[in-house]
């Protein structure tokens, strides 16, 4: 059986689809998968042994110059690739109008989410078969349920477990071939002492852990004798990484890296600390102990999902607000008895005042096996 998966972006969403591919490969012997994905993330599907062909698409880039000759030429090449194979099944795993529109060009019956289940209900117009997948569960579980419904196999028992992901996922669930990753990157030296990667880059302004807090956390880790590694993906992140690392023994800013190079570096880390970001999900997929920090977003829906993942969520009245912008009138001020009230007026966004660097360090070092775990709420 040969299927086409359409899951184009973002990095975290692409990684969330990997356990479903593993489920399908286990349930259907000899399954062959192709995958349509944004060009920036094309390395990821290629690391799964069940994925035979990766078909990059460049919607993000094309929409900037839709009528350019190069755009038209690349679109024709994409159309030729997606129509070159007859598929037994096409799964739109994204549930967006754009992904459904891409999927309908493929040669094969398209399956997707029904009107009540998709993020954009109009996507259903492109589907031959529509499936109901309940909201309220983690994104990984929802994709696994969609694949099981489309390919007619029972939902794996572990996919119906605790949505915090801590007891229902391991490296084998994601199915990534570590040798493929290492083959695509330069070898990395094995750790000689505690090595922590700070995954500080993210998209929404409100998901950013305050830079001053990152700096203090790096200082604490450096004083404890640990190495701190800071990746970056754009000039703004590069500048922030340089400021965090400035003058700290053992803190280093990594060179600009491909996803394969970052993945190889992650595999040498003792643990990571991350905001709600795609690289945090990559660390989870590689089974790297990771502490994820959540302010405005909901860890139960999109938190890093895996065996050695821990989440610290802001214990703040308005969190999780799911807002990309922090609105002072919407951000409820804690009463004087609230544990993080003293720092709340000094931190932006205020919800991260509940996650001071000392608390984060206690949890991170415990995750790396060095010290007892901190209390669930700051005192």
Image (tube, helix red, strand yellow):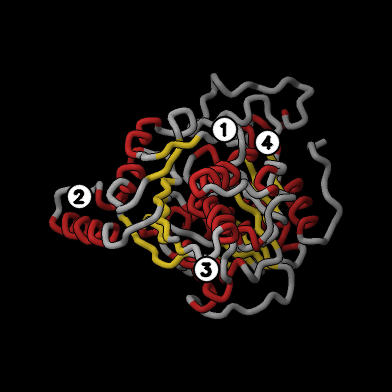
Find residue 161 and report its horizontal and vertical position in percent.
Answer: 71, 43
Q: Mark 2 points at which residue?
A: 65
**Quarter of the figure with the C terminus:** top right
1 vs 2, front mark: 1
Q: Distance between the residues labelled 2 and 3?
A: 35 Å
Find numbered disc 3 in the image and state the secondary structure of the residue it sits on.
loop
Residue beneath the point at 53% across and 62% down: 231
Mark 2 closeness class: few <14, some 14–19, many ≥20 residues within 10 Å: few
Labelled disc at residue 314 = 4
Residue with the mark numbered 1: 134
Question: Which residue is more in the foreground, 336 or 1?
Answer: 1
- Of labels 4 and 3, earlier in sequence is 3
Of badges 4 and 2, the one in the foreground is 2
Q: How crowded is mark 4: few (under 14 residues within 10 Å), some or many (20 or more)?
A: many
Q: What element carries label 1?
A: loop
Residue at which label 3 appears: 49
- State if disc 2 and disc 1 touch (CB < 8 Å): no
Give the mark, 1 or 3, whose residue is nearer the N terminus.
3
Instruction: Using the rendered view, name the quadrant where residue 25 is placed.
Output: bottom right
> Separation of disc 1 and disc 2 at Cα?
37 Å
Q: Residue 7's x, y, as percent? A: 42, 50
């Amino acid at each position: 059986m040969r299927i086409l998966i359409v899951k184009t972006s973002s990095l975290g969403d692409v990684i969330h689809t990997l356990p479903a591919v593993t489920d399908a490969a286990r349930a259907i012997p000899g399954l062959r998968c192709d995958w349509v994905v944004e060009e920036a993330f094309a390395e990821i599907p290629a690391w799964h042994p069940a994925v035979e062909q990766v078909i990059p698409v460049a919607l993000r880039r094309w929409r900037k110059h839709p009528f350019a000759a190069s755009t038209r030429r690349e679109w024709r090449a994409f159309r030729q690739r997606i129509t070159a194979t007859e598929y037994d099944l096409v799964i739109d795993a994204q549930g967006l109008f754009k992904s459904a529109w891409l999927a309908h060009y493929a040669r094969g019956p398209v399956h997707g989410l029904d009107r009540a289940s998709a993020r954009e209900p109009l996507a259903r117009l492109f589907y031959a078969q529509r499936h109901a997948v309940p909201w309220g569960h983690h994104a990984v579980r929802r994709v696994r349920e969609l694949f099981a419904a489309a390919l007619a196999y029972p939902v794996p028992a572990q996919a119906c477990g605790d949505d915090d992901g801590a007891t229902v996922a391991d490296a084998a669930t994601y199915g990534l071939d570590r040798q493929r990753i290492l083959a695509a990157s330069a070898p990395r030296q094995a750790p000689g002492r505690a090595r922590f990667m700070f995954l500080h880059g993210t998209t929404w302004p409100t998901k950013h852990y305050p830079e001053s807090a990152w700096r203090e956390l790096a200082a604490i880790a450096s004083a404890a004798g640990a190495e701190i590694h800071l990746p970056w993906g754009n000039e703004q992140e590069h500048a922030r990484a340089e400021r965090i690392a400035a003058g700290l023994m053992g803190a280093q800013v990594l060179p600009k890296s491909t996803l394969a190079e970052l993945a190889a570096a992650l595999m040498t880390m003792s643990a990571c600390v991350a905001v709600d970001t795609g690289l945090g999900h990559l660390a989870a997929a590689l089974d790297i102990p990771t502490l994820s920090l959540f302010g405005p977003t909901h860890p139960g829906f999109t938190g890093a999902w895996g065996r050695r993942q821990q989440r610290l969520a802001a214990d703040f009245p308005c969190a999780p607000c799911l807002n990309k912008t922090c609105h002072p009138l919407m951000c409820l001020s804690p009463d004087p008895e609230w544990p993080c009230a003293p720092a709340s007026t000094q931190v932006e966004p205020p919800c991260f005042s509940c996650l001071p660097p000392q608390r984060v360090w206690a949890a991170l070092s415990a995750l790396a096996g060095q010290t007892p775990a901190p209390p669930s709420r700051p005192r």
